[in-house]
Amino acid sequence: MANENLAIDTSVLLSELKEANQEMGQVIESIRQIAQHTNLLSLNSAIEAARAGEAGRGFSVVADEIKKLATRSLTSTKESTKIIENIQSKANEVMAVRTADVAYDTMDKIDRNLFERNCDAQAWAGFDKVKNCFTSNASDRSLEANKLLKKLVDIYEVYLDLYVLDTEGTIVAAGVHHQLIGQSMAEKSWFKEAKAVNTISVSDLYFSRVFNAHTVAYTCPIRSDEGQILGYFSTRFNWNFIYDIIDSARISKNGDLFIINNQGYVIACRSRKGILVDNLKTLNAAQLAIKGETYGYLFEKDLMGLKIYGYAHTRGYNAYKGKNWSALVTEMI
């Protein structure tokens, strides 16, 4: 039962609190209007009592008491309004902090996931059957490497394909797309970057025509026992698995969540639309995140009303330094 309570979406509770505050505000406004009308009525009564002279003296006393009651009602209404406005402000602040927390947690989960992919590439680059592509004279060395890569793809599921390349960028083994064997990747940016740093290199998100899907390439050197670079091992992460994280984020029906790269382009969102097309760099929250602010939130108005923008910039995880990506979460107030 306790676990079920923990699963309650706090954004729903905060939204209900906000609605309750608005209803309270409407009640206070009704009381204020009644007090104003009562005050006006007492004024009119006092005027009529004065006209009636001695005969209206008793009515004048009643009118005066009504005026005092209206005055006290207006004073109480102003005090209640301040209290309600303060409650609404605090509720908005709580929602804003929670929105920033969702952005932070989402970015952290993505970093942890990609850290594992970082480790996979480095570990598999050290497998004997991978090294044998360059150190063995066996005629079936590429075939054995292909079988190993295919087995890894089948077991781990989060990869679209795995490759072994020589130092010039030619694919010598592949797990799935064997038609790529013999093709040169020397001019691909992910290979150039890997060769330049000669350590694990991670590409930004890009669209691959081979898979007809978005992917991230992890490429690292394959080294001999003496440390000499023999070739390169490269993986293709299936970006769809990031949506497991995106879809599990607890945001309201009217909210949204975006992952953006260091140029502001959307690389993931709940709708799966506008990937590497839509750019959010004009948003103040996006600008702060891109600049490297780890965590925060802003209130901004647009045509739909007041919105909360929670944001978080990647911190990386352990050896994985991240790609300067950021998470943005929006909630309507």
Image: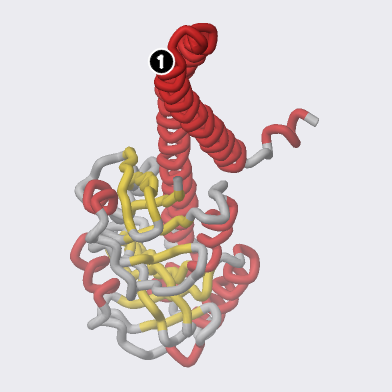
Q: Looking at the picture, tell me which residue is in the foreground, 287 or 38.
A: 38
Image point 39% across, 45% down: which residue?
Answer: 308
Q: Position of residue 163 (x, y in %)?
A: 44, 75
Q: Position of residue 331 (x, y in %)?
A: 45, 49
Q: Is residue 69 visible?
A: no
Image point 41% across, 81% down: which residue?
Answer: 208
Q: Is residue 182 above or below residue 250?
A: below
Q: Position of residue 7 (x, y in %)?
A: 68, 39
Q: Looking at the picture, tell me which residue is in the foreground, 110 or 172.
A: 110
**From the image, which quarter does the C terminus lie in?**
top left
Q: Is residue 326 visible?
A: yes
Binning the other alpha carbons within 10 Å of mark 1 as few (below 14), some (14 to 19) or many (20 upward) gives some
Please give the residue where the numbered disc 1 appears in the rendered image.
50
The quarter holding residue 244 reads bottom right
Badge 1 marks a residue whose secondary structure is: helix
Colouring of the image: secondary structure
**From the image, which quarter does the N terminus lie in?**
top right
The quarter holding residue 8 reads top right
Image point 49% across, 25% down: which residue?
Answer: 38
Q: Position of residue 72 (x, y in %)?
A: 46, 13
